[in-house]
Amino acid sequence: DADVTQTPRNRITKTGKRIMLECSQTKGHDRMYWYRQDPGLGLRLIYYSFDVKDINKGEISDGYSVSRQAQAKFSLSLESAIPNQTALYFCATSVTGAPETQYFGPGTRLLVL
Amino acid sequence: GNSVTQMEGPVTLSEEAFLTINCTYTATGYPSLFWYVQYPGEGLQLLLKATKADDKGSNKGFEATYRKETTSFHLEKGSVQVSESAVYFCALSERSDSWGKLQFGAGTQVVVTP
C-alpha cells in the first residue's frame, strides 16, 4: 500500500461548489503539505502543517482552507471553486529532522468548469 | 525573494545519451539544493540533494554539484534510459523560520527515445 494516499484521484466540479481533497499517510510523519502544480509554474505551496495544532499559509493560500484532523490526515478545501483552481494537487509529508525530504502522494487532478 | 530557474523542456534525447539539465538559483542565505523527479502519473520523489557549497549529490547515476560561485546545481547523467523519461524539478530550501519549505523550479520534461 502507498504511504501517502490522496482521494479522489480525479474530480470535476462546477464553479461555486465546495469540494474537499483528502490526504492520508501511514509514514508517521509530523509535517504535511499541500501543493498545486500548474504547467510551466512548477509546484507552489498552499498550506503546511508542522503538527496537528500548527497550520501555516503558504504562498498561494487565498481561496483554500485546510484541516489537520489527526497526525495522519490533512484535508484541503476549496470553499467556492473557480476555474483558475483547475490544477494538479499534491499532498506531501516529511519528518521534523529532515523536512526537505518530502514524500508525495500521487496527486488529485481537479477540473473546475 | 528566493527563486529557482531551470532550462525549459522538453529535452528529447536518445537512450544512452548524456543528460544535462541546468538549474540556477537566487537566495538570500545559504540554501540546501535538491533535485526531485516526477515519473508519469506519479508524485514527486527526491532524487538527490546537497546542503553546502561544493557538495556533490548523487543517486542512481545522476549527479549535481552545488556551485555557490555560479549559484548553480546542474543535473547530469552519463547514459540515460527510456525509463528515466520524467519531469525533473530543481528546488531549494533555506534554513530559517520556513524550515522545510521547498521552492521549486518550473520543471524540465525529459523524453528519452529508444
Image (cartoon, rainbow, N blue to C red):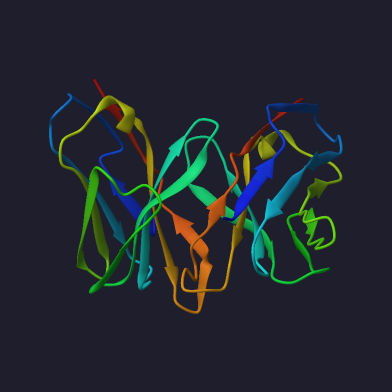
**Position above or below: A48 against A6:** below
Compared with B41, B67 (above or below) is below
Task: Answer with left or right where residue A83 lies relative to residue B32.
Answer: left
Q: Residue at x 48, y 62 (%)?
A: B101
Q: Residue at x 83, y 68 (%)?
A: B54
Relative to residue A57, is residue B14 depicted above or below?
above
Where, by quadrant of the figure, is residue A73 drawn?
bottom left
* Image mark count: 0
Instruction: List x then y, in percent, for residue A59.
Output: 41, 51
In the image shown, does B23 or B44 lie closer to the viewer? Answer: B23
Quarter assignment of residue A52: bottom left
Q: Kindly tell me whether residue A1 is visible in this rendering.
A: no
Using residue A42 as the reference point, say whether residue B112 is left or right of it: right
Q: Is residue B114 above or below residue B104?
A: above
Q: Going by the picture, which residue comes out furthest to the left?
A: A17
Q: Position of residue B86 (x, y in %)?
A: 62, 37
The percent position of residue A33, horizontal first and vertical second, equals 37, 58
Q: Image point 47% across, 68% down: which residue?
A: B98
Where is residue B68 shown, x and y percent of the image?
80, 63
**Residue situated in front as seen by the camera: A49 or A25:** A49
Residue at the spot 77% in from the left edge and 43% down from the top edge: B22
| Direction from residue A23 to residue B13 in the image, left or right | right
- The residue most toward the bottom is A97
Q: Quadrant of the N terminus of chain B?
A: bottom right
Does the image show residue B65? yes
Q: Residue farthest to the top?
A: A113
Quadrant in which the C terminus of chain B is drawn: top right
